[in-house]
Amino acid sequence: MNTIDEGEMGVRNGFFTQKELDRVMAESDIGDVWERLRGARVKEKADGLSRVPCILRGHRNETDRDMVLNHRHNLFYCFHCHQGGNVIDLVKTVNGSSWVNAVYWLGAKRGNMA
Ligand SMILES: [Zn+2]
């Protein structure tokens, strides 16, 4: 997954500033994002790893806890789908949205004014 090029494109095209992108990434916790997407709470949301049901599109059995949330590094990985990434990748994959729209979904403000 290469999000750096897409991120640079979003910034370069004026969708948002690098500063705004950095803020959104810093303030978006992988556990909070999973909860918002799933509409359920993350159990054992400690400073470490959480095993949760996978919410990626196409994942068959939603009751198995195949997905790991790494709270320290703000990353996810599914051992069944073999997909992983950061908070933006999770939103993008679950919602089936563009990278830029995933950044907006996480709360980025538009414009190149900052
Ligand atoms: Zn999965």
Image: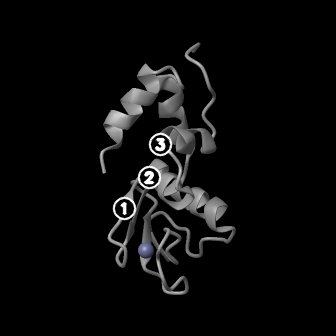
Q: Quadrant of the C terminus?
A: top right
Q: Is residue 87 above or below residue 67?
A: above
Give the image quadrant in which the ligand numbered 1 is located.
bottom left
Image spot of residue 41 (x, y percent) = 66, 71
> Badge 3 local density, few (<14 within 10 Å), some, or many (20+)?
some
Secondary structure of residue under mark 3 = helix
Q: Amino acid at mark 2?
A: Asp
Task: Tell me which amino acid carries mark 1.
Answer: Gly
The residue furthest right is: 39
Give the distance between the C-alpha atoms of the residues marked 2 and 3, in whole angstroms. Answer: 8 Å
Mark sitting earlier along the chain (2/1): 1
State the residue position of label 2.
89
**What separation in Å lies between label 3 and label 1 (alpha carbons)?**
15 Å
Q: Which mark is residue 84?
A: 1
Is mark 2 in CB contact (under 8 Å) with mark 1? Answer: yes
Q: Position of residue 8 (x, y in %)?
A: 37, 28
